[in-house]
Image (cartoon, rainbow, N blue to C red):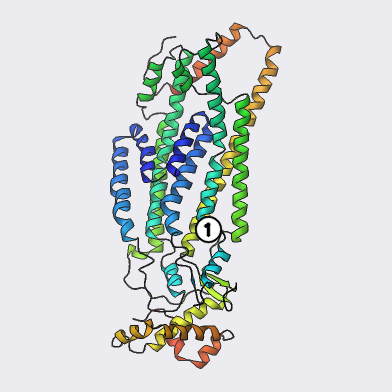
Amino acid sequence: MDWGALHTILGGVNKHSTSIGKIWLTVLFIFRIMILVVAAERVWGDEQDDFICNTLQPGCKKVCYDHFFPISHIRLWALQLIFVSTPALLVAMHVAYRRHEKKRQFRKGDQKCEYKDIEEIRKQRFHIEGSLWWTYTSSIFFRLVFEAVFMYAFYFMYDGFRMPRLMKCNAWPCPNTVDCFVSRPTEKTVFTIFMIAVSSICILLNVAELCYLLTKFFLRRSKKAGNPKHHPNHENKEETKQNEMNELISDSCQNTVIGFSS
Amino acid sequence: MNWAGLYTVLSGVNRHSTAIGRIWLSVIFIFRIMVLVVAAESVWGDEKSAFTCNTQQPGCNSVCYDHFFPISHIRLWALQLILVTTPALLVAMHVAYQQHQEKKLLVLTGHGDPKHMEEVKKHKMRISGSLWWTYVCSVVFRLLFEAVFMYIFYMLYPGYQMVRLGKCEGLPRPHTDRVHRVVRACARRGQHNSNPSSGKGSFYGHKLSSEYKQNEINQLLTEQDGSLKDMLRRNPGLQEKGDRCSAC
């Protein structure tokens, strides 16, 4: 079980996400997980071995390392990425439950069921409405909370996002205040700032997605409330359908290869 | 998620690129990413462990390495390749959006059967209209990122050259005079070594003894109350040599 397996699991969720959700997932995998695996892990690879203290006192170096780095950046980021990506599994579970219900209806031979075969049920993409909307919105909310908590934890533990070159340690068993030198501090600072910047972008994307879902919800609600007042007859539906078709044709007329008949 | 994962993501984009775009993508993957993974990573693999300073002063090696290599070539190249290849995803997103619109249209006109849906997925989009603008923007962003990274490289490593010998001198004094004391200790090494070319063998032999190391540490620890001016007053020759971590 590694990052590749997480990619496989979350790739399936992608189908049922909004466009902003798909962008968020791409940013997560390319600018955070990939950077972590390909670059950041090498930078932090020698963090303990090359953490040098100006002392020969046995145990002093280990104690000082533990004092300054209670949890390494790399491990915090790995935890953050796992926590932030797993609320999407709530959506995956809800979709799987709905599919299971549809399959059960189909097998019972329910007349209400509009599917021709089981494969169609498996391939169908569910719209984000009803109870699925609530699940999806909750998952985005949890993502936001986890991102914010980890950013705060980072800031709190490392007192800002900068990695100093020199740290002074006087924890027992160090005989006095000892100078300890961190390995590759500038490179670590650069990557910390990069990862924090991308986390902020992800937070903004999540906020945008939440606003988009709320707007869609309220618009749908006002449409439903407004509809009984107007004439909900067949002619109106046909008009709306034709309008939509005209819009789609004018948007895609330059790239359409397949010919249509009305 | 590693370079192979990026290749999977980007190879889908290839279908909707121009001929030159496909050549560019092949050059990126074969001559840059592959060379990075199979060759450059082994060259830079021991960059820190084999960075040797002519001193036994603890911390001098780390500080000097950080001074010369604020960010390693390998990491800069990895960042550059990731940032340069991702604008192609803008094109992929636009194509996916257009395919989605076409599928919607097919469903509305009553051609929503699986055969037509598959045809939409397989057919190649012409780069015209709004897709042209997206494609041009992605190329402009690629150029911009390439130029920015080449400039960063030039700024950090003037002349794109890797020197054999770096002189670690005149380090900035961040917050405390402890680092400066480290630099002064490095300078003391240079002072002791009055004739480096002839006495190299015995110099290194002497350096490696743990007794000598302990003496150095004891000296550093007892200079808690010292200041730079006192040191300079006691050793006027120190200022002439400058603060050097390595003698040549």
Residue beneath disc 1: A72
The reply, left or right, for residue B28 in relation to residue B176 is left
Circle 1: residue type: Ser
Chain to which the residue tagged by mark 1 belongs: A
Quadrant of the image for the C terminus of chain A?
Answer: top left
Q: Secondary structure at mark 1?
A: loop
Find residue B56 and report its horizontal and vertical position in percent: 42, 79
Quarter of the view holding residue B55: bottom left
Seen in the picture, residue B14 relative to A104 is either above or below; the reply is: below
**Nearest the eye: A106 or B165:** A106
Which residue is the extreme one toward the top? A234
Q: Would residue A249 be seen by someone viewing this image from the given angle?
A: no
B173 up-or-down from B46: above or below? below
> Who is closer to the viewer here, B69 or A58?
A58
Q: Is residue B82 left or right of residue A74?
A: left
The image position of residue A81, as x and y in percent, is 52, 46
Residue A163 position in % (x across, y down): 53, 63
Nearer the observer, B201 or B90: B201
Figure check: B131 above or below A222: below
Residue A71: x, y in percent?
55, 58
Instruction: Name which residue lies at 43% across and 87% down.
Output: B240
